[in-house]
Image (cartoon, rainbow, N blue to C red):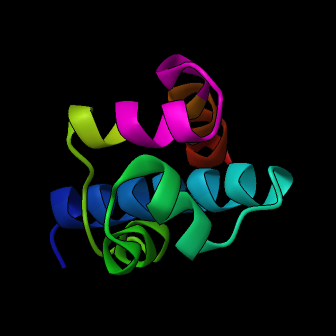
């Protein structure tokens, strides 16, 4: 795997961990987050598993459903990326 591919995979996994942690802190299931964010549950699963990259609009929808600013989600992603 090329260095850029490893970096991208690491970033996707870090975003997924951040999203999952915030969702669980809010005591939401993927189904509930899907309902509140209007993002398909299977897509949320793919995000949390590092299989997909979210668009800006998806990040905004998820953050709104989690009652946080999009920047908080990105800050959590950055913290996960450092670990």
Would residue 29 be found to the left or right of residue 64 on screen?
right
The residue located at (19%, 79%) in the rendering is 1
Q: Is residue 63 magenta?
A: yes
**Above or below, 38 relative to 41:** above
Q: Is residue 73 above or below residue 24?
A: above
47 magenta-colored = no
Say whether residue 23 is left or right of residue 65: right
At x 65%, y 29%, the residue is: 67
Residue nearer the viewer, 70 or 29: 29
Region of the chain picked out in magenta, as a range = 60-72
Q: How many numbered circles does the render carry?
A: 0
Q: Residue at x 80, y 50 (%)?
A: 26
Give coordinates of residue 15: x percent, y percent.
Answer: 48, 52
Camera-side residue of 25 and 28: 28
Frontmost residue, 60 versus 49: 60
Residue 66, compared with residue 14, is above or below; it is: above
**What is the quadrant of residue 68 in the picture?**
top right
Residue 41's image quarter? Answer: bottom left
> Which SS does the magenta portion mostly show?
helix
Q: Would you say 70 lies left or right of 72 here?
A: left
Q: Position of residue 30 (x, y in %)?
A: 57, 72
Instruction: Identify the residue at image location x=56%, y=45%.
Output: 81
């Amino acid at each position: 795997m090329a260095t850029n591919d490893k970096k991208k995979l690491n970033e996707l996994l870090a975003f997924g961990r951040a999203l999952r942690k915030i969702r669980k802190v809010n005591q939401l299931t993927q189904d509930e987050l899907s309902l509140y964010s209007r993002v398909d549950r299977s897509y949320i699963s793919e995000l949390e598993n590092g299989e997909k990259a979210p668009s800006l609009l998806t990040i905004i929808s998820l953050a709104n459903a989690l009652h946080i600013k999009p920047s908080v989600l990105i800050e959590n992603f950055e913290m996960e990326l450092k670990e």
